[in-house]
């Protein structure tokens, strides 16, 4: 179980850490780094009530699993953003 928490923490820390590089080097929008970083964190805060409600309905484990699937799918799409 500790390995799962470690991997989850790593999965949360890496996107937040690499976000600045992604905006500057892939999107090539260094002037929008601040507003996009703010949007990144506000989106997470606004999603908390939904995930809390879902955890109460279906359980924490199933909610965590669903969030990991959704996050993985969403981050796979990020590779396409730099191509346009």
Image (spheres, grey):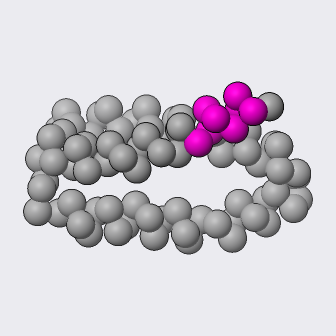
Q: Based on the picture, tell me whether residue 4 belongs to the magenta stretch.
A: yes
For image coordinates 35% across by 38% down, the residue present is: 78
Q: Position of residue 23 (x, y in %)?
A: 22, 49
For image coordinates 88% across by 51% down, the residue present is: 59
What is the magenta range?
2-9
Q: Quadrant of the C terminus?
A: top left
For image coordinates 23% across by 44% down, the residue present is: 21
Q: Position of residue 83 (x, y in %)?
A: 19, 33
Using the image, determine if residue 59 lies above or below residue 75. below
Q: Magenta span: helix, strand or loop, mainly?
A: helix
Question: Residue 33: which quarter of the image?
Answer: bottom left
Q: Based on the picture, tell me whether residue 71 belongs to the magenta stretch.
A: no
Q: Quadrant of the N terminus?
A: top right
Question: Is 39 positioned to the left or the right of 46 in the image?
Answer: left
- Residue 79 shows in the view: yes
- Residue 71 shows in the view: no
Question: Is 62 positioned to the left or the right of 73 in the image?
Answer: right
Question: Residue 67: which quarter of the image?
Answer: top right
For image coordinates 69% across by 65% down, the residue present is: 50
Question: Residue 45: which quarter of the image?
Answer: bottom right
**Between 47 and 7, which is closer to the camera in this rendering?**
7
Question: Is 48 positioned to the left or the right of 59 in the image?
Answer: left
Using the image, determine if residue 49 lies above or below residue 18. below
Using the image, determine if residue 41 lies above or below residue 4. below
Using the image, determine if residue 40 lies above or below residue 79. below
Q: Position of residue 30 (x, y in %)?
A: 12, 56
């Amino acid at each position: 179980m500790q390995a799962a928490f470690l991997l989850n923490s790593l999965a949360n820390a890496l996107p937040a850490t690499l976000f600045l590089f992604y905006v500057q080097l892939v999107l090539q929008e260094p002037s929008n780094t601040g507003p996009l970083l703010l949007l990144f964190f506000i989106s997470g805060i606004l999603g908390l009530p939904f995930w809390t409600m879902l955890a109460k309905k279906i359980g924490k484990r199933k909610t965590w699993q669903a969030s990991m699937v959704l996050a993985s799918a969403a981050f796979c799409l990020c590779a396409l953003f730099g191509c346009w």
